[in-house]
């Protein structure tokens, strides 16, 4: 009947009607008579209906069946509607996420503004408030900045207990000020107190605790306490990992400190030091290009390459360090160190003209920042004198090497800095043909170098020691 009504061959029709015919047969076989076709006419209507691609109207009233038939008949319309609905949902989700992100950024900006305001007010109160010198037996004009900060820090802990974010920001700022003043012990004590406060208020896992731990490690390393610094780095790294802060600024700083500590252990750790320093430099470049710590990460990376005799890579890292110092708020002395490091590497590579230019820039920066009596200025001048002698200015270069070595004997006697200067002078005498003086000076240098451990030095000083030792 269906075949005759639709004028079709059986084989294609069988596949097209399989579902509908199954449904009709299922209705005719239902156990409850009330659910079967009521009349033969009803059965005929459904058979004729499926032959015309219509939906069944008598036997199958199930919702799933009706839906399937509708979709089959209007498949392109349904498909387009579904795509449109999904697109609308996706757009809505993106809009919601952007709105939430904007809210988070606004909240962060508001918190940072509040911290900055509180910090400014605190420093104004410490250095210009009406209670300056309160409790002291000396007039305010006789008090030092460190004493004023000490007094302000005590008041800070008493007054900001209920404002933990602002308290921790002030701890960071005041601790950093103590570091600039080279009062390392006070800085470390303040950072450690902040770590304890952060853990007490926010639990054992939090970003503020991790950040202060990194500062503790950095300060310990600067003070030359390698064992304490290594222990603090391990604690800081564990805290950062627990907090999920592997892309944060303080994680990059922790990697920088970790690499520097490995360098301080000796040349055999240079290869191991490269990895954290490379990761630190990459993080700073990608997320925090103007952070002052970026330049130091690059300087330490250049030193690691130097220890491994990877001169080309060392020069590349030093180039980046110079660029980083010019694009950040580093002190002039640190900018000078970057130029001096690059000069040392270029000197080692035989690029004497470029090295001479860098040494001159470094000397100018040292002179403007720490003066001509500072050992870093004197040391840089000694290296410049060596370069002059090698460049053909033999008398002028030798005189400068002699003068700076004598100054370092006064400023840094018994240190690696002076030991290397003495070796440099011995080499200068040898080039000049003064063999007796060369042997005497070299003997003194050897006697100095043997008992010395090249401990923690400021980055510029260490770069000179490394480059000069390798050359000599």
Image (spheres, grey):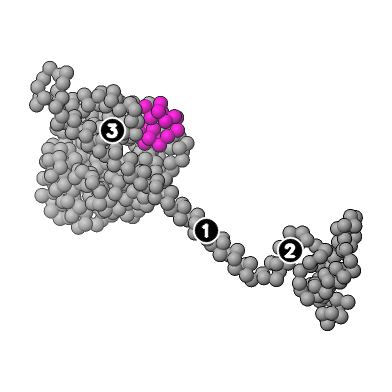
Residue corresponding to mark 1: 90
Occupied quadrant, residue 418: top left
Q: Of residues 30 and 364, which is closer to you in this image?
A: 30
Q: Secondary structure at mark 2?
A: helix
The tag on residue 170 is: 3
Provide residue 103's location: percent of width, then percent of height: 39, 47
- Nearer mark to the viewer, of 3 and 1: 1
Lower sequence index among marks 3 and 1: 1
Q: Residues within 10 Å of mark 3 (few under 14, many from 20)?
A: many
User: Does the stretch in magenta take in 208?
Assistant: yes
Residue at 85% over, 68% down = 42
Alpha carbons under labels 3 and 1: distance apart: 43 Å
Give the position of the C terminus as an image quadrant: top left
Does the residue at mark 2 contact the one at mark 1 (Cβ under 8 Å)? no
The tag on residue 306 is: none
Q: Secondary structure at mark 3?
A: helix
Residue at 16% over, 21% down = 134
Q: Of residues 103 and 200, which is closer to you in this image?
A: 103
Asked whether residue 217 is in view, the answer is no
Q: Residues within 10 Å of mark 2 (few under 14, many from 20)?
A: some
Write the start and end of the magenta stretch as one range.
197-214
Residue corresponding to mark 2: 66
Q: Of residues 110 and 143, which is closer to you in this image?
A: 110
Provide residue 109's location: percent of width, then percent of height: 33, 45
Q: Is residue 155 left or right of residue 257?
A: left
Q: Is residue 224 above or below residue 327?
A: above
Q: Of residues 408 and 251, which is closer to you in this image?
A: 251
């Amino acid at each position: 009947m269906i075949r005759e009504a639709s004028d079709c061959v059986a084989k294609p029709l069988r596949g097209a009607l399989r579902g509908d015919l199954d449904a009709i047969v299922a209705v005719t076989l239902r156990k409850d008579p009330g659910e079967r076709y009521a009349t033969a006419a009803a059965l005929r209507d459904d058979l004729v209906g499926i032959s015309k691609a219509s939906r069944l109207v008598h036997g199958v009233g199930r919702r799933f069946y009706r839906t399937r038939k509708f979709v089959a008949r209007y498949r392109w319309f349904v498909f387009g509607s579904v795509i449109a609905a999904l697109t609308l949902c996706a757009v809505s989700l993106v809009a919601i996420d952007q709105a939430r992100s904007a809210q988070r950024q606004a909240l962060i900006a508001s918190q940072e503004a509040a911290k900055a305001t509180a910090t400014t007010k605190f420093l104004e109160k410490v250095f210009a408030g009406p209670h300056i010198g309160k409790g002291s037996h000396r007039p305010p004009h006789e008090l030092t900045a460190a004493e004023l900060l000490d007094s302000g820090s005590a008041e800070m802990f008493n007054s900001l207990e209920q404002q933990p974010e602002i308290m921790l920001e002030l701890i960071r700022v005041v601790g950093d000020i103590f570091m600039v003043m080279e009062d390392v012990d006070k800085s470390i004590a303040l950072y450690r107190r902040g770590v304890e406060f952060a853990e007490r208020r926010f639990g054992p896992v939090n970003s503020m605790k991790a950040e202060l731990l990194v500062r503790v490690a950095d300060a310990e390393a600067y003070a030359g306490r390698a064992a304490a610094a290594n222990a603090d780095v391990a604690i800081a790294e564990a805290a950062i990992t627990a907090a999920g802060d592997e892309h944060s600024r303080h994680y990059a700083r922790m990697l920088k400190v970790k690499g520097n500590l490995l360098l301080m252990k000796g040349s055999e750790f240079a290869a191991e030091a490269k990895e954290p320093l490379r990761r630190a430099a990459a993080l700073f470049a990608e997320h925090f290009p103007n952070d002052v710590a970026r330049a130091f990460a690059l300087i330490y990376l250049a030193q690691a390459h130097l220890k491994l005799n990877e001169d080309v890579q060392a020069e590349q890292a030093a180039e980046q360090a110079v660029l980083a110092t010019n694009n950040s708020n580093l002190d002039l002395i640190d900018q000078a160190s970057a130029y001096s490091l690059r000069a040392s590497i270029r000197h080692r590579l035989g690029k004497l003209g470029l090295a001479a230019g860098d040494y001159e820039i470094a000397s100018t920066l040292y002179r403007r920042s720490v003066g001509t009596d500072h050992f870093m200025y004197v040391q840089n001048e000694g290296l410049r004198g060596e370069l002059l002698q090698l460049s053909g200015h033999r008398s002028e270069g030798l005189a400068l090497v002699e003068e700076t070595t004598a100054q370092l004997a006064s400023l840094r006697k018994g240190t690696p800095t002076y030991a290397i200067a003495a070796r440099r002078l011995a080499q200068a005498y040898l080039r000049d043909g003064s063999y007796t003086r060369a042997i005497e000076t070299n003997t003194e240098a050897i006697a100095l170098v043997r008992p010395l451990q090249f401990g923690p030095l400021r980055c510029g000083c260490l770069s000179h020691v490394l480059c000069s030792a390798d050359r000599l």
